[in-house]
Amino acid sequence: MLDNRKILALMFMLIFIACDNSNKIQSNAIDISLPLDSLISGLLEDKELIGAELNIYQNGVISFNKVYGWNNVNRERKIEKNDIWAVKSMTKPVTATAVLILRDEGKLFLDELVAKYIPSYKGYEQTTIRNLLPHNSGDDGSYGNHTANVVDFNSQEDWVMDWAKETPKGNLGEYDYSNLGYEALGYIVSKVNQQPLEEFIQERIINPLELKNPHTYFSPSKKWADRVPYRYKMNGDNRIELIHTNKDEQSWKFFPAGFGLWMANEDFVTFLQMWMNEGKHKNLQILKES
């Protein structure tokens, strides 16, 4: 099993820390910048890390921001502040926020059955939206070669409906990471609000939070494409393997609710701070405090 240091080297890293306004947390935030800076610099020297950006958000502002390393192993471009990262599964908290916005508005309820929205669902009949959010629906995440089959479908609905025919391999109520559980949530948001998930996220999360560089689709023709670091993973021989460059088109045809966002580090810090600020951004209540 890879240790934590090697896990950090699997791909370019997006690092962000949000702190609230208490004096204790502020003090800790100042203190942790030095050890984190040292850790990241050491990983870079040991060639266990290629590039990273570190932000510490404190008392309403980013109090520490530093970039490290390169956008690929060939050192063709240094990482720059607010480069745009494929945040991958950190898309899930954004999709969860969309679900909770609709809950706040009374348009759906967390204890409603998944089968209400996906009648063909072959999972446990008691499975609710609440089960999907923390990954305890019983789906073990193995569907479609762990979602590699996303490239075979033309829409999120087609993908979700294909998954819905699967019998769960896990147990309802037990944690098991499921990308498709979040695709089901994204589909439910789209169905309830009668608009594509990415449009809802743009209108109800990205715009109100005043995020500057979030994107729901990548193409090398985009003006911001050269700001995207390459992605890597560690293969079975503990060697770095290239997954995606900023010269490659994305392989899926629609916005995946579980891993579809590209975002600048500062934007994701702003999103996290809304959660830590009891659902508020400035004077706007994005989510109810509860």
Image (cartoon, grey):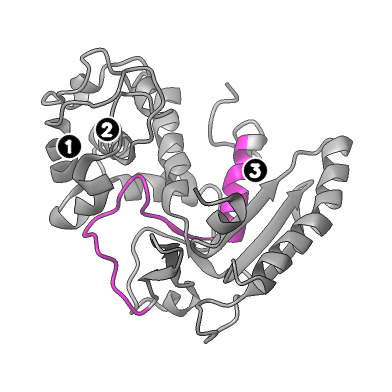
* Residue at the spot 30% in from the left edge and 37% down from the top edge: 141
Residue 48 in the image: above or below residue 180? below
Q: Can residue 64 be seen in this view?
A: no
Which sits earlier in the primary sequence, circle 1 or circle 2? 1
SS for callout 1: helix
Residue at left 24%, top 53%? 148
Total tally of numbered discs in the picture = 3
Residue with the mark numbered 2 = 188
Per the image, the residue denoted by label 3 is 273
Badge 3: residue crowd in 10 Å (few <14, some 14–19, many ≥20): many
Q: Which dot, 3 or 1, sits closer to the camera?
A: 1
- Could you classify mark 2 by the number of other residues whose Cα lies within 10 Å: few (under 14), some (14-19), or many (20 or more)? many
For label 1, the residue is 163
Residue at position x 52%, y 65% from top? 12
Ranked by sequence position, the earlier of labels 3 and 2 is: 2
Q: Position of residue 211 (x, y in %)?
A: 54, 56
- Say which residue appears at 85% left-offset and 51% top-offset: 30
